[in-house]
Image: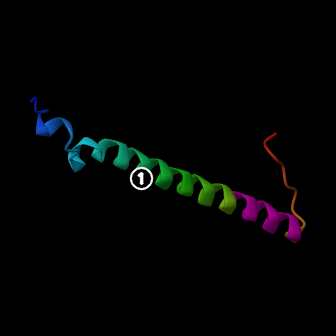
């Protein structure tokens, strides 16, 4: 009768913390970029309603 090492089948939290933090940071960066782009877009709309010239970067 053979027994397998117990550590091969126990998964600890520290093994997955790097992936967890990468996911959290990626999500936060994505949300920050979305907020920044929305603020820029709303500022362009505000300028357009005031009658100022609006130049798009494309």
Q: Position of residue 50 (x, y in %)?
A: 86, 70
Quadrant assignment, res 11? top left
Name the quadrant of the N terminus: top left
- At x 78%, y 60%, the residue is 44
Residue at image coords 87%, 70%: 49
**Residue in front for this viewpoint, 46 or 26:** 26
**Main SS class of the magenta portion in the image:** helix
Q: Which percent across, then down, holds residue 5?
A: 11, 34
Residue 26: say if magenta.
no
**Residue labelled with disc 1:** 24
The crowd level at tag 1 (other Cα within 10 Å; few <14, some 14-19, many 20+) is: few
- Against 42, residue 25 (above or below) is above
Q: Residue at x 47, y 47 (%)?
A: 26
Q: Is residue 15 left or right of residue 21?
A: left
Number of numbered discs on residues: 1
**Range covered by the magenta-colored residues:** 40-49
Where does the C terminus fall, quadrant-wise?
top right
Percent across and percent down for residue 9 are 21, 40
Residue drawn at (14%, 32%) of the image = 4
Question: Is the residue 51 above or below the residue 4 in the image?
Answer: below
């Amino acid at each position: 009768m053979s027994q397998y090492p117990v550590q091969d089948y126990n998964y600890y939290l520290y093994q997955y913390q790097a992936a967890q933090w990468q996911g959290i940071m990626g999500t936060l960066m994505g949300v920050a970029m979305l907020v920044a782009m929305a603020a820029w877009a709303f500022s362009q709309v505000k300028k357009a309603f005031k009658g100022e010239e609006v130049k798009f970067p494309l």
